[in-house]
Amino acid sequence: MSATTIIVAVWAYMATGSFWKALGWTIAVLVILQVGYFALVMRLIYSRARKAASQGKVDAVPPLHRDGGRRG
């Protein structure tokens, strides 16, 4: 992600000659990369959850104590 951002920043500056336009393109690239990363992670989580549910590996009853500690 850093390498892509640096390459786009340098390319935009060389193409336009303007620091501000290069900064704008750089920010746009950062936003697009973050949105794409978020979408990819959500897709991975959704596909694994769907696969686990179809195989019956999901427990319908939540655990009583999530931290593993004992009460009493």
Image (cartoon, helix red, strand yellow):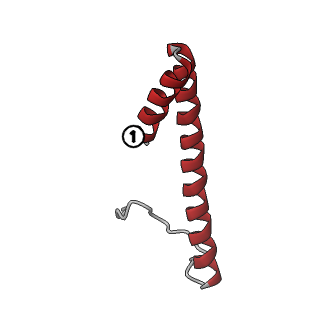
Task: Rate crowding at label 1 as few (under 14), some (14 to 19) or many (20 or more) other CA atoms within 10 Å.
Answer: few
Please name the residue shown 55% across and 81% down the image. 57
| Left or right: residue 8 compared with residue 21 | left
The residue nearer to you, when weighing 34 against 17, is 17
Residue farthest to the bottom? Answer: 55
- Is 20 rendered above or below residue 63? above
Q: Position of residue 70 (x, y in %)?
A: 35, 64
Count up the numbered dots: 1
Please name whichever residue, 12 or 72, is drawn nearer the observer in this view of the structure. Answer: 12
Secondary structure state at the residue bearing disc 1 = helix
Q: Which residue has dot 1 on it?
A: 3
- Which quarter of the picture shows residue 62? bottom right
27 sits left or right of 53 in the view: left
Which corner quadrant holds the N terminus? top left
Horizontal and vertical percent position of residue 7: 44, 35
User: From the image, which quarter does the C terminus lie in?
Assistant: bottom left
Q: Position of residue 40 (x, y in %)?
A: 57, 56
The answer to whether residue 70 is above or below residue 40 is: below
Q: Amino acid at mark 1?
A: Ala
Quadrant of the rendered structure where residue 33 is? top right
Q: Residue at x 48, y 23 (%)?
A: 14
In percent of width and height, residue 49 lies at 59, 70
Closest to the observer, 39 or 58: 39
Residue at left 59%, top 48%? 36
**Residue plotted at (56% across, 63% down):** 45
